[in-house]
Amino acid sequence: MSVVEERTAVEGRRTAAPRRARGGAPVRYRGVGERPNVLGGLGALVWLVVVALPLYALLVATIQRGENYVPEGPLALPSDPTLGNYATAIDKGLLGFVGNTALVTLAVVALVVVLSATTSYAVVRSRTRVTDAAFRVFLLGLAIPAQAVIIPVYLIIVRLGLYDTLTAIVLPTAAFALPVCVLILVGSMRDISEELYEAMALDGAGPVRTFLQLVVPMSRSGLGTVAVYSALQAWNGFLFPLILTQSADRRVITMGLYEFQGEYRVDVPGLLTAVVVSTVPLFVVYLVARRSLADGLMGVGGR
């Protein structure tokens, strides 16, 4: 390299290197694209009010006395706050409804994760006409609403002797969650490179070992998305518990909310208290798995 070329290279590196402050951190310059976005900030503030106002009304109602709810208004701070609504909700069997819902949700999540993971692995790796046809059948399930097949589902559940059991809620809920979950995991598993499969084959790994030691760890985001999605479907399910169960001790939380509604009166603070208690577990699940949920959905969008 000549002297001129060497000096040009040195000057180029000096020009490209960012200026640093005394502490060693690079100095940031405010460019055109980094100007304060006042309009965007105002829009975010409006959106925050739109989201926060119903939550405020919901939480305030849980400590409002029933006789004061209408006179004071849903947005007013309670003049005589109380926690009696939570005690009333528990007396009406709220914890039992939450327990049944938790059992149904855990069973649905376990079934959906295992079945969708193995099915997606077969679709991605088998690449035969049979697997392609099976994948198209799963995609066809996206277009079939549960209301359209509720009568055949009811007859099947009765023939199996599962009517008025929690299993009667678990099976159709898992079945209707599978199409979306298979679609998510197929997109996630297709991101695994062929070289990794070849490396596992050279190491002597069979299909089962490859699935457990390569596919499952590399599909964590997709599996997290599937778990969160199926949990939401099971926790908020209404149609199958309404049609396929009858006994009071088989009620889930969506059916248990009817306990706060009478023939001529609705206990609004008690009803909203039950709603708050029922949403806390889902809120915790969302906080824990929100990153996996976003990553998995982005993987689906890229396919």
Image: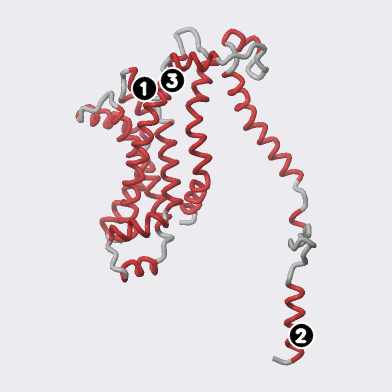
Q: 3 or 36: which is nearer to us?
A: 3
Tell me how many marks there are.
Answer: 3
Q: Earlier in the sequence, mark 2 or mark 1?
A: 2
Left or right of 54 in this view: 135: left
Q: Which residue corresponds to mark 3? A: 94
Label 2 vs 3, first from the N-terminus = 2
x and y, in percent, of residue 1 in the image: 69, 91
Residue density around tag 1, few if under 14, some if 14–19, many if 20 or more, within 10 Å: many
* Mark 2 nearby-residue class (10 Å; few <14, some 14–19, many ≥20): few
Residue beneath label 1, please?
Answer: 251
Which residue is more in the foreground, 232 or 50? 232
- Report whether 256 appears left or right of 111: right
Q: Quadrant of residue 200?
A: bottom left
Q: What residue do we see at 39% from left, 26% from top?
A: 99
Q: Amino acid at mark 3?
A: Leu
Gap in angstroms between the C-alphas marked 3 and 1? 10 Å
The part of the image, by quadrant, that contains residue 51 is top right
For discs 2 and 1, the disc positioned in front in the rendered view: 2
223 vs 137, left or right, is right
Q: Amino acid at mark 1?
A: Arg
Tag shown at residue 7: 2
Q: Tell me residue 89's x, y (percent).
A: 47, 16
